[in-house]
Amino acid sequence: MFSLVDCNNFYASCERVFNPNLQNKPVAILSNNDGCVISMSDEAKKLQLPFGAPIFKWEQFCKEKNITILSSNYPLYGDMSARVMNILRDFSPDIEVYSIDESFLEFKGFENYDFEEYATKIRSRILKWTGIPTCVGIAPTKALSKVANKIARSNLKQSKGICVINSDENRIKALKWTKIGKVWGIGNRLEKRLQAKGIVTAYDFTQVSSDWVLKNFSIVEWRLQKDLQGISKIPLEDAVSSKKMIATTRSFENTYGDIDNIKERISTFATSCARKLREQKSSCHVITVFLRSNRFSKHQPYEKENKTVILSFPTDSSLTIAKAATEAVKTIFKKGVQYKKAGVIVSGLVPNDNYQLNLFLHENPKHKPLMAAIDKLNGKFKSDKLKLGNQDLQRTWKMKQERLSPKFTTNINEVITVK
């Protein structure tokens, strides 16, 4: 059996743990630089505040509806997420942290367990130890546990946050209730293709032949169909599996029209990507750099430029990646444009211990021990004290966060004082 444990309105719930005045009231959480709505409480959803709403357009609406608007407090959310995941590890050693607010558990050797009771224990312990409400879906496969979780979430009063699919009758009933577009892994394009074939619900998808699915789609959709039929074909993924692409992108606090500031930012972003590569023991073949102007500006047209660089050899060196990225910036930078956002994306990733060598070109052998020393020192002091020469030593990226709550669990100066 598999379980999907999902935290309800996670960002809003984290804020409510330390500010009980927000309980049962509409709350909206903003993206980087207080740009748009990325999370909200059920109360805010009922008021029809749309996801992705630019706050400068919807601020008056929020005032009229008494919606509390908060900046994203990522240190708080990350710490609370780690606490929830550590609790879940007490309930099963087989866990896949799927996102910041949800995890899959696999129950091997739990045949004699009462899963309703076990799910209740999971919810109760997380709520008691962290204050975060959750929903738990349990079923024979990962895809079905996703369906079960959605059912539990759809009617909290009746389900009490728990849904267990433990019979074929329950499975069929759940699949007939689930629209095909709500199935895990079914995107908008795939939904339209399936609907064109008369497949409206998840149950309809399980009734077409597997050969037809393989012929018209791929092995991914075939596995999904089998999972929905109760035949487990999607295993837990390794929690430390390598990403296939790494990106560092930021909106600037102000716009920049000079290339020196842009190059400094791009060098910093490239260094961040290189560090992430080393953490997962990977190297990259491809570097993409992009620049964006402010799309909401009324004074200049929206500009967007990209440049992709293909390296002659795979690398995880901050020196090599930053140099290639800053050279790429020179080719796409336009004078007179005020840039608001930039980013670096590394792809074509290969493991450091298994990649094709180049007979004539290779990484400078001094880079490996240098990067290891930099990572060790930065890890020791918990900050990027050591930087490249083309980075601003006094500068740290700072988001616009005008509505930021305190870092209750990660900053000793901001913990709650009990009087």
Image: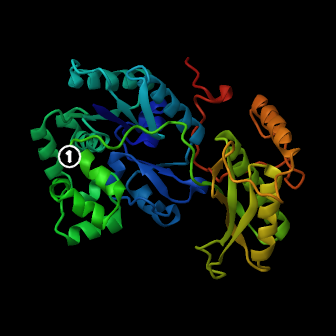
**SS type, badge 1:** loop
* Other-residue count near label 1 (Cα within 10 Å), few / some / many at <14 / 14–19 / ≥20: many
Please state the horizontal and vertical placement of residue 188, each as a whole percent of the image: 34, 65
Quarter assignment of residue 102: top left
269 or 325: which is nearer to us?
Answer: 325
Please state the horizontal and vertical placement of residue 310, each as a whole percent of the image: 71, 66
Identify residue for label 1: 229
Please state the horizontal and vertical placement of residue 293, each as a whole percent of the image: 66, 72
User: Which three-letter amino acid code belongs to the residue tagged 1?
Assistant: Gln
Please state the horizontal and vertical placement of residue 393, each as a whole percent of the image: 86, 47
Q: How is the image coloured?
A: rainbow
Residue 262 lies, with reference to residue 353, above or below; the image says below
Direction from residue 388 to residue 59 in the image, left or right: left
User: Which residue occupies the extreme left position in the image?
Assistant: 169
Specify the quadrant that holds the N terminus. top left
Could you tell me which residue is drawn at 45 percent across and 61 percent down? 52
Specify the quadrant that holds the C terminus. top right
User: Which residue occupies the extreme front position in the image?
Assistant: 359
Q: Answer whether residue 301 is visible to the viewer in this image.
A: yes
Direction from residue 232 to residue 368 in the image, left or right: right
Q: Answer whether residue 250 is visible to the viewer in this image.
A: no
Residue 296 lies, with reference to residue 122, above or below; the image says below
